[in-house]
Image (cartoon, rainbow, N blue to C red):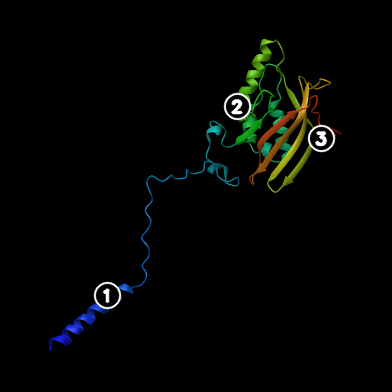
Amino acid sequence: MKKPILAGTLLALLASIAAAQITPNRPAPPLRRDPNAMIEPPTTMPPPGEPLARRSPTPLASGRPVNPGEADGASVDAILAALYASVSHPDGTEPDWARMRAIFLPVGMLIPPKPARDEIFTVLDVDGFRDRVRKGAAAAKEKGESTAFFEKEVARRLDCFGNVCQAFSTYEARRAPSDERPFTSGINSIQIVNDGRRWWIASVVWDIDRPGNPIPEQYRAK
């Protein structure tokens, strides 16, 4: 009589094991983050469409105005006029640095022509450009030369797509606005962007008219 009981117990045990093996799938436990893994740092500059109040200043933007005037960014014409007006100044004074900062993006760049002796281009923000101008002005004063600088646009080729514009802006620079001939001329390649509220200058790259590098006819004043 004991054998049937033993067989029934064995069958029950096997059935219990089989049921345990056919349980529904359970969700996998959450992965644990490796504390030594590299965590990607948050971005310091939101997309261009973000409101100004939510933009975080970058190291290059330290001390720059948070709410610049809107008038200079109202149109492409206005911001290019502001660029030339801000850099022009009479002898003994400096460019309008506050106005220039207000029309450039916080990380906007100015890239002057590369001297043949240099291996790479110099890339400046507005403050770096200010230091470069001041150094040049100090050298001119030591020589007894004028530090006046009046730059104006004499021709422009503008291409736009959506919120981006590229201007090839031909310029002439004089020591006084009344001077008949400029002491230098060239082309400013200016990249301009619109954030939905106003225009900003993203970068200015330029080269000068010189022997072997004349301004092409299509970019000259008509």
| Viewer-side residue, 123 vs 125 | 123
Q: Is residue 221 left or right of residue 131?
A: right
Q: Earlier in the sequence, mark 3 or mark 1?
A: 1
Q: Nearer the viewer, residue 188 or 40?
A: 40
Please provide percent x and percent y for residue 11: 23, 82
Callout 1 touching callout 2 (CB < 8 Å): no
**Can see residue 133?**
yes
Horizontal and vertical percent position of residue 163:
68, 46
Q: How far apart, in angstroms, are the residues tagged by discs 2 and 3? A: 29 Å
Which quadrant of the rendered structure holds the N terminus?
bottom left
For label 1, the residue is: 17
Q: Indicate the quadrant where residue 65 lies.
A: top right
User: For the residue carrying disc 3, how many other residues have a C-alpha within 10 Å: few (<14), some (14-19), or many (20+)?
Assistant: some
For residue 128, the mark is 2
At a point 63% along the width and 18% down the height, the residue shown is: 135
Where does the image place residue 212, in percent across and percent down from the top left?
Answer: 80, 26
Check disc 3 and give the amino acid type.
Tyr
Q: Which residue is mark 3?
A: 219
Q: Amino acid at mark 1?
A: Ile
